[in-house]
Amino acid sequence: MEVAPSLVLDQYAQLPRTGKPQPGEWTVVAGIVLHSPSEAPRVVALGSGTKCLPAAAVAADTRGSRLHDTHAEVGARRALRLFLMDQLERAARGAPSIVVPRADGRGYDVAAGVEFHLFSSAPPCGDAAVVASAGPAAAAAQIECERPPTHAAKRHKPSAASPPAASPPAASPPAASPPAASPPAASPPAASPPAASPPAASPPAASPPAASPPAASPPANGSTAPLPAEQGKECAQTGARPVSPRAAEGEAAARGRACVAGVARTKPGRGERTCCMSCSDKLARWHAVGVQGALLSLLIPTPLRLASVTAGGRASLDALLRAIASRVTTPSAPAAPRVAIARGVAFEYAQPSEGDTRPCSNALLWYSGGTCEAVNGLTGLRMGANKRSFSPKHRAQACKALLLRRFCKLCIAVPKHHLPPEISAEAMSRSSYASIKGLATAYQQRKLEFLQSSVFREWVIAPPVCEAFTDEDVNGPPSEVQEAARAIV
């Protein structure tokens, strides 16, 4: 959507100064624009930030009190979930809302014609930031990527029904291996790998659309072939680390000269490694399973997907489309969203190409109908929280604990005939966060298919104890929920 960048940046400019970068700092902002036939496009969710918690801090958060990932795109998605909860609450009491009851009476759907469009002021970290140039230099920087083995204890382990290695990931074309067998004879052809593969001869017809219009046409659904490299661009890289040991070894051997394209990665950062997956990988997951998440899938069962994704900065159409859609090869993989690059859009706090600057450690989260909240990205708590003594008041509104409390209240507010049979509103507060998410069986099936695909089978997950808490455990007796139940009865 062409107006998404300006709408998001204007909304960010209107937010309070608290939590925004100080002189010498930069940040990334992302927002989600709602477009519907009945109203003008408007921003409904916004997030900014560049930080995430280290793995040890994530494992220690057993009560769902902290935001583990405060990157901009993740913040925007959290804000969207809060916005959707607000819309469900409005629908439950008969107020105007973008959600309407389903035809079968169980749950809700987003009204016909409503679309969500994402804009990020920079390329999403991870695979979308890996851009290969054309020519011999690119051939030297290309690293072959094969399906990595599954072995890490803290990574997702596919079930016995997971597909074998018959479906390879977005790997380098077979023509890349012969040059390795005969380097002397392969060096001349190395300058012309694009012409070596027949499909690469026709993409020039596809590359003009990538250069001139703001949006690119998606490839065939489920395609795993590498996308054509954009001409005349240097090899941009990402600090996000591959979860595959093989890919990590290849990048280490390249000594910073190249990155593997098409692989899953954890968030970039210095110091202790994090267990948070990159924004590119999370965007691919949301595209495959639905952006509303497991909890809201119980009330909005139809997968909600982004209609378009626009990125600013040094983004690449090919890399953006590859990261979000081309790597998703599940049986139920949807059509790719429209992707676009925002050229000539200036963000006041963008990372400069030169100069001694540092990323801002704070994050902002805002949604239409709610308030703006500033979060310390280094702690995952609201700004101003005492580092030595924790209080429930320090929790951000989008943390798992408060999200669960709001969901429990929502299940009470929604008329019983609109609740799916799996939900017992009275038992919600005594059920664990993980078990409630597990009730969304259709969502969990899409998620399983995604995690069993070749590219994402080593997805790093947080320890199960991080979602073993209940609403009563972390928020106390649900007196407000009980009062709401009595009021409805």
Image (spheres, rainbow, N blue to C red):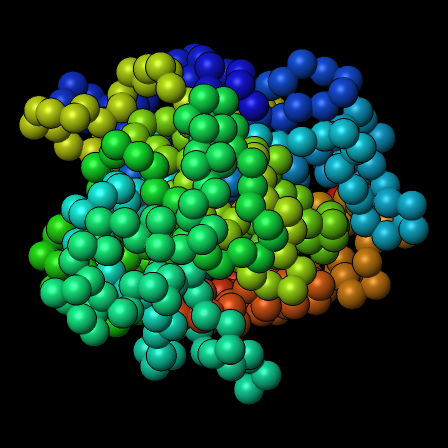
Residue at 32% in and 18% down: 347
- In the figure, residue 222 lies in which quadrant? bottom right
Residue at 39% in and 45% down: 228
Q: Is residue 382 above or below residue 439?
A: above
Residue at 86% in and 52% down: 106
91 or 73, which lies in front?
Answer: 73
Q: Is residue 452 above or below residue 377?
A: below
Is residue 362 something that shows in the picture? Answer: no
Residue at 59% in and 63% down: 330
Q: Is residue 171 left or right of residue 251?
A: right
Q: Position of residue 184 (x, y in %)?
A: 12, 65
Q: Could you tell me how many numbered marks the image carries?
A: 0
40 or 81, which lies in front?
Answer: 40
137 or 248, which lies in front?
Answer: 137
Q: Is residue 241 left or right of residue 67?
A: left
Q: Quadrant of the N terminus?
A: top right
- In the figure, residue 83 lies in which quadrant? top right
Q: Is residue 250 above or below residue 52?
A: below
Q: Position of residue 123 (x, y in %)?
A: 35, 36
Is residue 420 something that shows in the picture? Answer: yes
Q: Position of residue 43 (x, y in %)?
A: 56, 22
Q: Position of residue 345 (x, y in %)?
A: 37, 16
Q: Is residue 135 left or right of residue 382?
A: left
